[in-house]
Image (cartoon, rainbow, N blue to C red):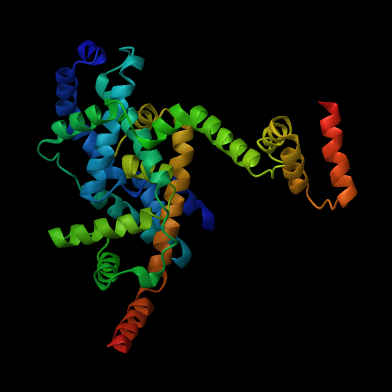
Amino acid sequence: MRTDHIIKVLDQVSVSGLSEHQRKLIAEHISHCSRCERAFQAAQMAEVLLRERAAVTTEVPPFFQQKVLARLREKQAPPIAGTFWEMWRAAGLLISSMTALVLLLLALSSFPPGSSPPEELPELAAGFSADPAEGVIFGVDQLANDEMTYDQVLAAIYHSEDAR
Amino acid sequence: MSLAREGDEFAFEEIVRRYSPRVFHIASRFFRQRSQVEESAQEIFLRAYTRLVDYEGRGSLEGWLTRIATTTCLNLLRSLQRHPEMSLTDLTTEESKWMEDRLLDSAARHHRSQEDSLIAADLADKVLDNLSPEDRLVLMLIDGDEASVKEVAEMTGWSESKVKVRVFRARRRMREAVEKLLATPQESRQAKQRTTAGKK
């Protein structure tokens, strides 16, 4: 008998399922083949282990049905409203637009003013129409970095009188 | 069944009560710890509830539930982390002794105590952990429960040819794993004793 033949038989049929003829052939072979003898012993032990393992049973614990139903109801229950994630998804567009608006306002407020304040012009005009001389003087005083000679001041005063 | 399909909880509760033993039996083929068996049994019934609409009434309800139980347990077992290949030093002293006793008296049916049975079941789990979930299933059903190839094919949805090929390969892998354990049990026990003495 070929050495691998008995091993093939052991893998095809369980030890308890061997026929008498097969058992006879195996016994004859393993008497002079230690390799197959170990294989046969391992097959026998494997089957015993499987039988012992199969004999282990777990009984149904009390109230098992109630536990299953409780879990079923838990699974079927609607998700909790007001969770952060649902709120975020619902308000995402609004929050995004508000954030964009705030950023825009910050950007606009960060630009510096480019010209003199407009409130100063009406005062200057008021100063000219009410009292030209004083207005000129006030106007001269408000002129930034302008230095006028005495002749220029007189010319400016009398020019305004001639215009009235 | 029709009431359960319409959402009648009392009807479904009756199904759970009636078929729990069967479902627990199948789940215990895959898992050893009671908590895992119960957890997987709950998963099986929850899945069955969602698939009630798919049950067309062909075949028995028990057979239909058995199939769901088998596939659910297979999926659960696949998701668990596999143990590394066990070595001889992973055996406890009791397990090594059990194997040696079996070798010496493997043919005779000697009286086995409950403790011996538990040791053997633990050892079987260790060896089966080295197999794939599918191989474990076919071996437990065919060699453990003495189920027929046809019954296993109905439970798993596999063809009978596939079941035969699977059981052939599974037996070979289990036999090879046990051969490794049997290779040098005496040396292993001595090494373990030396290790234990060194730690003390």
Estimate the x, y position of residue A113 in percent, counting from the top left: 70, 42
Q: Is residue B177 left or right of residue B40?
A: right
Q: Is residue A106 depicted above or below B197 in this figure?
A: above
Q: Is residue A130 left or right of residue A147?
A: left
The furthest residue to the left: A62
Q: Residue at x 30, y 60 (%)?
A: B123
Residue B155 quadrant: top left
Residue B146 quadrant: top left
Residue closer to the observer: B189 or B129: B129
Q: Is residue A59 left or right of residue A45?
A: left
Q: Is residue A161 depicted above or below A151 in this figure?
A: above
Q: Residue at x 38, y 59 (%)?
A: A42
Res. B96 visible in picture? yes
Q: Residue at x 22, y 38 (%)?
A: B24
Estimate the x, y position of residue B172 in percent, counting from the top left: 46, 51
Q: Quadrant of the C terminus of chain B?
A: bottom left
Estimate the x, y position of residue A136 in percent, counting from the top left: 77, 40
